[in-house]
Amino acid sequence: MAEPSQSAASLNAGIDLSQFFQVFFEEAAENLEKMEQMLLAIDVTAADDEELNAIFRCAHSVKGGAATFGFSDVAELTHQMETLLDKLRRHELQPTVAMVDVLLQAGDALKAQLARHQGSGQDAIDTTELLVTIRAQVEGGAAVAPAPRPAAAREPAKPAAQPAPTPMPASSGAASARALVLTVGPLEDTRQAENLFELFKEIPDLGTIEAIDGGQAADGMRRLRIVTATPDAELLDLCTFHVAREALRLEPASAGYGFHDGAPGAPEEAAADPGYGFFDNAPGSPDADTAAPAAAAVAAPVPTAASVPARAAAPRAGGPAGGAAAESSTLRVSVEKVDQLINLVGELVITQAMLAQNGKAIDSGLYQQLTSGLADLERNTRDLQEAVMSIRMIPMSVVFNRFPRMLRDLAGKLGKKVELVTQGEATELDKGVVEKITDPLTHLVRNSCDHGIELPAERVAKGKPEQGTVTLVASHQGGSIVIEVRDDGKGLNRGKLLTKARERGLDVHDGMSDADVYGLIFAPGFSTAAEVTDVSGRGVGMDVVKKNITALGGSVEIDSAEGYGMTVRVRLPLTLAIMDGMSVGVGEECYILPLASVVESFQVQPGMVKTIGGSGRVVEVRDEYMPVVDLEKVFEVPRFDFEHVANIMVVVEAEGGRVALLVDELLGQQQVVVKNLESNYRKVDDVSGATILGDGRVALILDIGSLVRRSRH
């Protein structure tokens, strides 16, 4: 991890804040993601105040945490973003597309900065131009005409007639620079106040700070003079990271500077105004005999998420009860701990299956209590297994949320107008599958925008709205999740696909079904793009998409209507850790077939199997011929009962094809814990994984897609 500046190490003497870094990084990432989504959804012609305030709060939370932990580059950039957002929410500027663009760019830069601080190894991000652009938007953005005010409140027309400026109230939050006095204390350790000087060094645009008490704090109080344009509430919020809120008081700089007569370090003019700036019983006042009054002159804003860890270094008595209740509703747990829990539950499932296997030999009449306990164990194990697996399930919105920004940038580059519609964002999928499906889906969405959606003028000429639509849909179907990527663009041209295929020397003919023709786009190097661009056209992508999805045990289907659009349908297992399977026996071996791939099973009758081409065999099932795959020969299973003839077939399907597997017997259905064979042994053809059976034997889980491809060759 990149080392934070010296101030991070000195914050709150004796407190190691590095223990909170990971929490800050996670919460900062969440805030930046939320900010990006709100910026993409904002209507610049009619921006809602609450939207602008919410975006401001996201930037403010990141800035507060960054300043606390000493990440000065992050704090500086977010501070500039805050300045622009503050003017927008105060209606001093009118939102523009250019402002949204620069804020999105700033969000990208912040993500890169945070990644560097997390130890990504990349070089420091140069944000000089970005900061200049933001300042230009602040100073030269579209100004908003001020709302009419009552005549009595309007300034005189001539500047000379204006009254001399007076100090602003502490909570006004004005944007112009002003002088303030910050009274800090009483403090048990006055060195805490030194951290405030470091804070101003880390964020240069925050203003200036100087001691006006000569550095003396015999009464436990410190007095600091601040010149800043930052709103008071935000200034106090930043200071609260280092000093408890009730020990802070902010007021306009004026005679007395908050000193009482004879206070250490008091300037001479303070003597003329004994007690000036104090209220009765205030901390540090001569007659103080009680604790600081509640509210401490300035109402404290709600603590930000990023401030929670830092505030633990300066605990306060009597914190709001509601905050603790809200925080207890969720718990952050590392993925490693969840994976370990899933592995342990997997072992428990295997142990339970072994007990159940051995329990079958027990006389239930003699050992009724034992068999009843085994039944309860089986039910509870299943419930525990489902509960633990649900922890790894995350909503598809995690994937879908990355596409609005990507589509916005891509459509702008291509000169197209595209709207993204999402459905089924709450549909949940295993985290491991989500991580692996994100890249294939990204390519499919880019493909829809680049190849599918037409240019606005072309769409209007066809009688379509100039804005195209890309739709993402997620839904559960049986034990799988189906993700659809639809667009209302030009669709696929059958004739063009066949022509391209012939040019590439592929074996095609005019009698091919539409599904087979559309499937040509998955051929390696196949592309229908007229020219190569930095977006697409090199023929790399769709073949990788299919390969990655197939590796997950999934399948891809394409539907298209020329002139109306195209749909790519991806079907995936809900989880890669546990699956429902059908056990089949071949000789002395047991194999597991994924239950989602099993269509039917039947006994072979005389005359059903035909031999073609001298060696290949097919079986007729309801007027349809399908290849026969003899598992005994595929896996070279040793057989000792030489008289036995396998006469059971199981029809399985994958990748749009079906085959009939020849087996000796059906052993039943069961839920199995999937073990990665490649990482524990080596890659085995036609096998996707392994599991441990109840009797302790290892059973191989068959790769149905690979068996279907084998039959085609």
Image: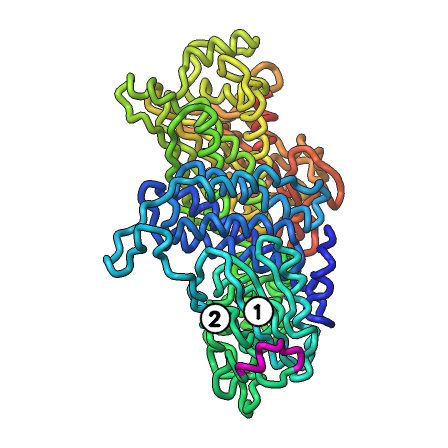
Q: In the depicted view, which residue is nearer to us: 448 or 616?
A: 448
Which of the 4 image quadrants contains residue 349? bottom right
Which segment is the magenta one? 264-273
Q: Let me know if residue 504 is in the magenta part.
A: no
- Tell me: 373 left or right of 423: right
- Tell me: 32 left or right of 41: right
Q: Let me know if residue 272 is in the magenta part.
A: yes
Question: Against 699, is 529 above or below?
Answer: above
Q: In the depicted view, which residue is nearer to us: 320 or 245?
A: 245
Dots 2, 1 in contact, CB < 8 A: yes
Identify residue for label 1: 240
Q: Secondary structure at mark 2?
A: loop
Which of the 4 image quadrants contains residue 12? bottom right
Q: Secondary structure at mark 1?
A: loop
Specify few, some or many for label 1: CA neighbours under 10 Å numbering under 14, 14-19, or 20 or more: many
Q: Amino acid at mark 1?
A: Thr
Identify residue for label 2: 300
Q: In the depicted view, which residue is nearer to us: 626 or 69?
A: 69
Residue 598 visible in the current orientation = no
